[in-house]
Image: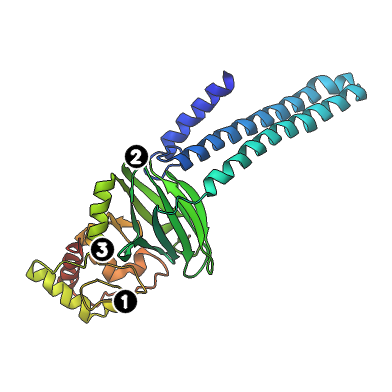
Amino acid sequence: AAVKALLGALSAVAAAGCGGTQSALDPAGPAAAEVLTLFWWMLGGAILIWALVAGLAVYAIVIDRPRHDPAATRWWVIGGGVVAPTVILTVLLIYGLRLIPPLVRDAPADSLTVEVDGVRWWWRMRYRTPDGPVETANELCLPVGEPVQFLLRSDDVIHSFWIPALGGKMDMIPGRENRLALQADRAGTFRGACAEYCGASHALMNFDVRTLPRAEFEAWLAGQAAPAAAPETALAERGERLFLASGCGACHAVRGTAADGGVGPDLTHIGGRLTIGAGLLPNDEDTLMRWIARCDELKPDVDMPAFDHLSDDELRALAVYLKGLR
Ligand code: CUA
């Protein structure tokens, strides 16, 4: 009861400090729930061993040393220092090993498959559909209640794909394809992160995850597959002309226009995303202007050049154009 009360108190403290969309303590899928249960068992085992060792140290100093009986001491060392930790650690090991197969098992062959590339410092997401790949960036939408197969790769250095609320994580290693199956059990908005140090902007390499009912997910995917809508206002039209004239299309694709670069994130539907800069900043016109003008100040070592030679009017037109790409 005491251990349970302690775990409850720790859980309350942890939940207060680590709640929100990026919490492994608030699972939204079976894999994350299993990992959380394992975490509590490991923590309980660690506390048990710590209490045992601390108790023995106190016993040794206060009772055993004054009495000075080597035969009794030997049994305490063997029992408390060797046997008890071995038993506790073996139980935890067996429990932990039993969890590995379900956590690394592939999703059924007909499951939704998403290829995710880690790139310094953003995420290329490519949905496999019967009509061909559908590319987006820095945001995943997933259907609720079904397993999704992720194929994880890297363009440059080792990254790691982690959505704490859904489970994982799994390294993304150049030249390899790692596999991870995840399932979301409820609709919501969560956050994923790169969990392997990969350079100056490692901490700024995040992504949004929206889990949607199947019908809403299908509508979203169909929207992503469609080419960009034509600009609706004169300002947005000016923005499109500037986008193409400034060479943005050399790195970014906006499907349906002449912009077909594949180096940077696909911007065909950037206006509908929750954030920009890989989970860095809210997706609004002012922030888009800041990002285009001085993205090097917002994200160290980013490949995209600063466009601070553009006037505020030009930056506004570009931002309005991009925000309109939904
Ligand atoms: Cu990518 Cu850390």
Quadrant of the snapshot with the C terminus? bottom left
Between marks 2 and 1, how big is the CA–CA gap?
Answer: 36 Å
- Determine the secondary structure under disc 1: loop
Residue 185, horizontal then vertical, whole percent? 37, 40
- Depth check, mark 1 against mark 3: the one in front is 3
Of the numbered discs 1 and 3, the one sitting upstream in the chain is 3
Residue under numbered circle 3: 225
Q: Who comes first in sequence, dot 2 or dot 1?
A: 2
Closest to the observer: 188 or 103? 103
Work out whether residue 188 or residue 127 is closer to the camera in this orientation and state it.
Answer: 127
Does label 1 point to a residue whose CB lies under 8 Å from ligand 1? no
Of 280 and 95, which appears nearest the observer?
95
Q: Which residue is mark 1?
A: 261
Q: CA distance from mark 1 to mark 3?
A: 17 Å
Say which amino acid is labelled 1.
Answer: Gly
Q: Is residue 1 above or below residue 284?
A: above
Tell whether label 2 touches label 3 (CB within 8 Å): no
